């Protein structure tokens, strides 16, 4: 899904005004063992969204089109 998003920037950390997507298992929690990540509820397919200042309709459209690719 992350690769299919067009509006969201892939970010190792969150803190800008634009919408960002992050995969904690690959970024903020990459230094933890898989067992410790699992214990903390951080699966390899967990994504974190930070919603920015873009038009809400554009954000919704981007999320829906990316999620639709999971159903194909």
Image: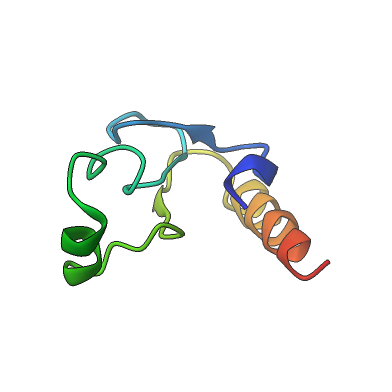
In the picture, measured across the screen, residue 23 lies left or right of residue 29, that is: right
Instruction: Report the residue at 69% width, 44% height from top.
Output: 4
The answer to which of 22 and 37 lies nearer the viewer is 37
Instruction: Report the residue at 77% width, 59% height from top.
Output: 69
In the picture, measured across the screen, residue 51 lies left or right of residue 59, that is: left
For the C terminus, the image quarter is bottom right
Instruction: Report the residue at 21% width, 63% height from top.
Output: 35
Residue 61 at what x, y percent from top left?
Answer: 70, 54
| 49 is higher (above) or lower (below) than 30 | below
Residue 53 at what x, y percent from top left?
Answer: 46, 38
The answer to which of 53 and 11 lies nearer the viewer is 11
The answer to which of 65 and 35 lies nearer the viewer is 35
Instruction: Report the residue at 30% width, 36% height from top.
Output: 14
Instruction: Tally the numbered discs.
Output: 0
The quarter holding residue 6 reads top right
Residue 2 at what x, y percent from top left?
Answer: 58, 46
What is the image's colouring? rainbow
Residue 32 at what x, y percent from top left?
Answer: 17, 47
| 39 is higher (above) or lower (below) than 45 | below
In the picture, measured across the screen, residue 14 lies left or right of residue 52, that is: left
In the picture, measured across the screen, residue 13 lies left or right of residue 10, that is: left
The quarter holding residue 42 reads bottom left
């Amino acid at each position: 899904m992350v690769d299919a998003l067009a509006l969201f920037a892939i970010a190792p950390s969150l803190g800008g005004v634009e919408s960002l997507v992050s995969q904690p298992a690959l970024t903020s929690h990459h230094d933890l063992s898989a067992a410790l990540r699992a214990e903390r509820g951080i699966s390899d397919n967990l994504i974190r969204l930070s919603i920015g200042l873009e038009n809400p309709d554009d954000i919704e459209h981007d999320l829906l089109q990316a999620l639709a690719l999971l159903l194909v």
